[in-house]
Amino acid sequence: MKNIIFDVDRTLVDSYTPELSTLKEAIFLATGREYEDSVMDQLTILTTDEFFQSLKITDSDTLKRINHYWGKLLEENPVTMFSDIPEVLNFLSKEQFFLGIATSRTREELEEITDLMELLPIFDSVVTSDQVVHPKPNPESILTILENNKLNPSETIYVGDSKSDMLAAASAGVSFAYAAWDNHDDTITYDYLLNTPKDLKKLFSFSK
């Protein structure tokens, strides 16, 4: 393997608890509606726009209120990278792997993660959901990276945590490494199982 493309949420960053809990509270403050955690979990596989559409929250004023509250709450509970991820990314960069990001976040949402933005220069290509017509599980974001950088799919691996990531990798014709450290799901199939972020160093130490 020469090329590694990453998902972001629950793969590079620990977003599950701070992001979903704060959004749940923001929706309640803006609308008075309270949703079960099982409903909020949809945000892990949908873009933010798709998530709000699934809840039938489409009024622009309501969305502005939700985003206002959400932004304030996230300032108090920021999304951060998993503790071992910066070390692993720096290792892979020094080993001269091609590094990419294909995420369901928009560029604006990506820029909210301060410590990830500090490391963004080591990535060779970043594709966010607002840069494609069809976000994951459609393979367009991964294919965009492959095509723009003339990468061989057989030399490329996608690292993600969800069925959406699994399906996108399969449709793009690349291998899938399951980042299971924050979301273990026995129904997900994979080419490589990663139980901790440091398993990335072990896997890619012998992949070139």
Image: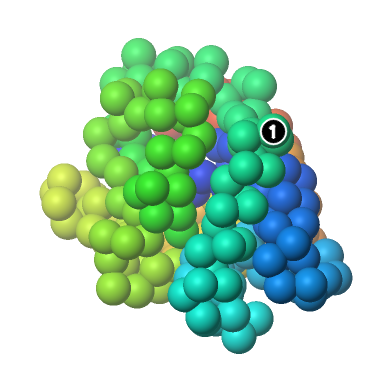
- In this picture, is 115 found above or below 134? above
Q: Is residue 136 left or right of residue 201?
A: left
Q: Is residue 79 visible?
A: yes
Q: Is residue 199 visible?
A: no
**Residue found at x 48% / y 38%:** 112
From the image, tell me which residue sits under label 1. 76
Q: Is residue 73 left or right of residue 2?
A: right
User: Secondary structure beneath disc 1?
Assistant: helix
**Residue found at x 56% / y 53%:** 68
- In this picture, is 118 found above or below 28? above
Q: Kindly identify the amino acid type of the residue bearing the numbered disc 1.
A: Glu
Q: Is residue 165 left or right of residue 92?
A: right
Q: Position of residue 146 (x, y in %)?
A: 23, 53
Q: Is residue 149 left or right of residue 59?
A: left
Q: Position of residue 115 (x, y in %)?
A: 50, 24
Q: Position of residue 89 (x, y in %)?
A: 46, 23
**Residue found at x 40% / y 68%:** 135
Q: Toward the viewer: 67 or 166?
A: 67
Q: Toward the viewer: 165 or 104?
A: 104
- In this picture, is 101 found above or below 58? above
> Around disc 1, counting alpha carbons within 10 Å, would you say few (fewer than 14), some (14 to 19), or many (20 or more)?
few
**Residue found at x 29% / y 25%:** 121
View extreme (bottom): residue: 56
Q: Toward the viewer: 158 or 41?
A: 41
